[in-house]
Amino acid sequence: MRITALTLLCSIVLSPSLLHAQKQPPDPFLRWMDRIAQQQLDKRASVISAIRTVAEAERRKEWVRKTLLDILGGLPDYHGPLHARITGHIEADGYTIEKVIFESLPGFFVSADVYRPSQPGRYPGVLLQSGHTQEGKPEPQRLAANLALKGFVALAFDPIGQGEREQTYDPQLLGPAAGWSVPEHIQAGAQSLLLGEAVGRYFIWDAMRALDYLVSRSDVDSTRIGAAGCSGGGALTTFLGALDPRVKAVAPACYPNSYRLLFSGPDPDSEMSFPSFLERGLDVADFVELSAPTPWLIEATEEDYFTPAGAQLVFEEAQRWYRLYGAEDKLRFYVGPGPHGTPLASREAIYEWMIRWLNDGKGDFHEQPVRLYPNQDLWATRTGRVEDEPGSRKLYQLLLDDFHDKKKPGTTQEVLAELRTLGISSDGSSSAFQVLDEATRPWGRRQRIKFESEPGVEIEGILYLPDSPGRKPAVLALADKSPYFQAPTIDSLAERMAKAGRVVLVLEPRASVPEDADRPFLGDWLANSRANQIGRNLPAMRAHDILRGVDLLAARSDVDSTSIRALARGVRGIWLLLAAAADTRIKKIWLDRTPYSLRVALETTMNNDLLDAVIPGFALHWDLEDLTKAMENRSVIWTDPSNWMNRIVPLPSPFRYRYILGDTTDLSDEQNNAFVDELIK
């Protein structure tokens, strides 16, 4: 195996502490979460370093497998027929491409291409996972065709949301309404979390069922099976190699990376990362170690954002495990040239690895030129969409079925206990704050402040302080930056309430600097994902921030602590509802254009900002109406309730509606004023 100079350099200079010190994230909230992640990784490292024997390694492997399946939500319990059918052929030079459709679950169609040698025989098989190209299975076709020419049967299939399996295809757009594959994955990831599952379970299951099909073929030797893939395909290859013992040679590229660097770097999307992964004591090396001593080729590229340095950490830890098994030759690390991807040198390293471990070392690893086919030529369906197949189902429908199978109503006392478990409540202690700047207004003062919500987490707000003497009722309002809301702004409402003699705090709960602001519908998905990985929940943390704002108000000498109200718009209303259910000091709340249900998000393929509201598994036992019930006799004003695409939904009382939205008539202002008056009276 050829090793680049960069590989040798990495082996000399890298250590986890040095690597992490090289680049600290600029985002204060991300730095705070990263410190927690590094502490969890430190704890894991001490466990791993204590493993000295094969027996200890085997016990760890048993625990890792059980833990992975637990945080995935298990794998689907279905072993029915694949109903596989070949829908077409392409006769190429020296090999044949068969177009295949099979069902990984009833009605859940998988489109695939099988590349087989032209000569009859029984060959080793290789399953190829596609990266995040929108076309899916055509992406690894050069690799697949060359494997076929070298005496392998290679199967490339479309992952969920890619190729012929787009989940949000809109005939008016002639494309996916979510934009492309990654947003579709994140959409499905949020829905899965509602059920306490990781959406990766369905991606892994598709790959396992693809293996079922591959080993069922008469031209495949089921004892000689490999798996390879790059990027998102590298992640799925990693998971499959760990969890399916039928895979005898594994070659993931441009994904395996320690969360020492991955957490504050290119933290992957929903199907590539699992909730509570770090909190439960895991890192990416666990996938490699779980299958030891199965042969693994770990690949990276010199300029990849899944850095060679992070991949080197995975390799070096796993190397010690393979040494325990006397199998050091079964683990290799290769760094290819260039950016993210599998250049020629990396592809040839994969051919060499598969030939070595699946074909007794017989064959030439050098790549041959092959014809590359456009996406439509490789379609397994007539239209290029599996949803047009009779009986086809989408992932959201599977999740909805799963919800109905697993839901178990919880009581009000149980939901209150859950809120305490989530750490929403505050201890009521006074929040010391710093005044960043102050301005005088005709009605009083406006102060921009900063205070600590919990050790290491600072949040900002604006205090509106009327000049009138004595203790006054107070209102906490959540800042609103959403483009979906028209005037009046939260600031204008706050000023109106201050003129009416109320102390107002407009609060901005903790948040990360947006890294994907150009991706619609996803909200602060990356911060939510990272919080879930370390065992924290971002909506719950933001609800805690709200209660720390209540602490600040209640401690003021000019505030009547028995008369605190609050208001929020959009998905932020759910954070406020969580806070109000947890703390009786909030006497009344106004929710405006807030989604009225979590569970309704399971009924469609797309949702907006759902990750900003998801508490894993919460929807199995409660919905938002249960939080309003937990407030008992405290008042909730809920205006213009919305669905998860920000559309107003007609619902019966107690929901209330404006005549119109916006600020184009006096009537709109009159209605908003009426709601303000009702909140503060």
Image: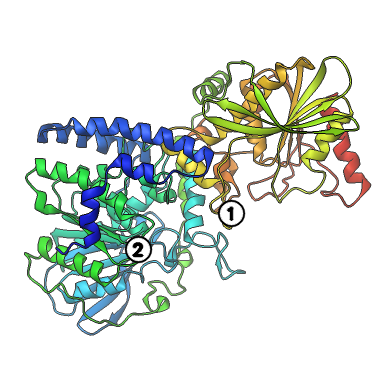
- The residue depicted at 10 percent of the width and 44 percent of the height is 323
Secondary structure of the residue carrying numbered label 1: loop
Along the horizontal axis of the image, is 281 left or right of 271? Answer: left
Q: Quadrant of residue 542?
A: top right
- The residue depicted at 46 percent of the width and 68 percent of the height is 385
- The residue depicted at 30 percent of the width and 45 percent of the height is 284
Label 1: how many Cα within 10 Å (few below 14, some 14–19, many 20+) = few
Give the foreground label among 2 and 1.
1
What is the x, y in percent for residue 316? 21, 46
Say whether disc 2 or disc 1 marks the residue closer to the N-terminus: 2
What is the x, y in percent for residue 665? 91, 50
Q: Quadrant of residue 497?
A: top right
> What label does residue 344 carry, if any?
none
In-front residue for pair 405/331: 331
> What label does residue 517 carry, if any?
1
Amino acid type assigned to the residue bearing label 1 in the image: Ala
What is the x, y in percent for residue 303? 35, 62
Give the residue number, with chain letter if any, for mark 2: 130
Q: Quadrant of residue 173?
A: bottom right
In-front residue for pair 184/447: 447
